[in-house]
Image: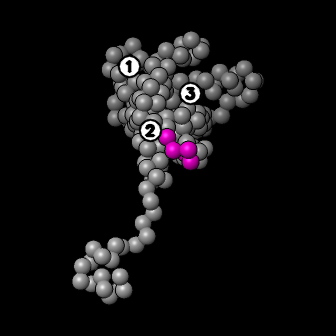
C-alpha cells in the first residue's frame, strides 16, 4: 500500500463499501421478501438503546432512517480498513458472518428470515461485496496516486507534425 494512503482515502474507500452493502440490502428488500433485513436489526438496536436511556422513540420512518444512517456510519468506519484485496475479502466475510451470529448474542434477536440458507448466503455475499467495493476503491485511489501526471501529448508521436511544436 502506498504510504500516502491516509485517512481521507480510507474514509472514501470505507464509504464505497458501506454504500454498496446498504444499497444492495435496500434494493433487495424491495424485490423479495426473503432478503436479509439488517435494517430491522438496526431499528431493534436503536429501540433498545432508547429504552435503556429512557428517551422517547421517534416515529417508525425516522427510526428506520436513523438505523440506515448508523449502518452507513459504522460500515464506513469498518470498511475503511479494507485497503487491500485480502483485507476486503476477510473483512467482508467477517462482517457477513458477524451479521448472522452477533445480533442474538447482543440481545437483538435473530435477523429476520435468517433461518433460511438463501438468506444466510445473501447476507455473507452482500457484506463481502461491501469489502470488495472498499478494496477496489482503495486500489484505484492508490493506483491514481502512483501514476505519473500527464504533462501533455508526446509531440514526437505526431511524426511529421512534431516539428511544428519545435521538437
* Residue placed most toward the observer, 155 or 81: 155
Which quadrant is the C terminus positioned in? bottom left
Percent of width and height locating residue 50: 69, 26
Mark 3 sits on what residue?
A: 42
Outermost residue to the front: 167
Q: Mark 2 Cα within 10 Å, few/some/many (few <14, many 20+)? A: many
* Residue placed most toward the observer, 9 or 76: 9
Q: Is residue 87 visible?
A: yes
Horizontal arrangement in the rendering, residue 18 relative to residue 53 (left or right): left
Mark 1 sits on what residue?
A: 120
Percent of width and height locating residue 69: 58, 38
Quadrant of residue 74 within the rendered picture: top right
* Residue placed most toward the observer, 66 or 125: 125
Percent of width and height locating residue 110: 49, 15
* Residue placed most toward the observer, 110 or 139: 139
Q: Which type of secondary structure does the marked residue at label 1 adopt?
A: helix
Give residue 135's mark. Answer: 2
Q: Which type of secondary structure does the marked residue at label 3 adopt?
A: helix
For the residues marked 2 and 3, what is the alpha-carbon distance in whole angstroms?
Answer: 25 Å
Residue shown at 54%/13% (left/top)? 104
Residues drawn in magenta:
1-5
Horizontal arrangement in the rendering, residue 71 relative to residue 164 (left or right): right
Outermost residue to the right: 54
Residue shown at 76%/24% (left/top)? 54
Amino acid at each position: 500500500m502506498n504510504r500516502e494512503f491516509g485517512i481521507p482515502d480510507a474514509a472514501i474507500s470505507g464509504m464505497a463499501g458501506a454504500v454498496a452493502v446498504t444499497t444492495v440490502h435496500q434494493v433487495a428488500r424491495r424485490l423479495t421478501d426473503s432478503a436479509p433485513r439488517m435494517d430491522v436489526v438496526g431499528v431493534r438496536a436503536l429501540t433498545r438503546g432508547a429504552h435503556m436511556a429512557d428517551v422517547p422513540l421517534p416515529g417508525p420512518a425516522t427510526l428506520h432512517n436513523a438505523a440506515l444512517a448508523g449502518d452507513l456510519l459504522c460500515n464506513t468506519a469498518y470498511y475503511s480498513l479494507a485497503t487491500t484485496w485480502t483485507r476486503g475479502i476477510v473483512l467482508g466475510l467477517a462482517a457477513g458472518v458477524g451479521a448472522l451470529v452477533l445480533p442474538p448474542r447482543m440481545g437483538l434477536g435473530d435477523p429476520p428470515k435468517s433461518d433460511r440458507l438463501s438468506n444466510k448466503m445473501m447476507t455473507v455475499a452482500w457484506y463481502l461485496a461491501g469489502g470488495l467495493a472498499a478494496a477496489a476503491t482503495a486500489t484505484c485511489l492508490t493506483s491514481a496516486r502512483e501514476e505519473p501526471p500527464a504533462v501533455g501529448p508526446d509531440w514526437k508521436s505526431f511524426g511529421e507534425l512534431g516539428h511544428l511544436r519545435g521538437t
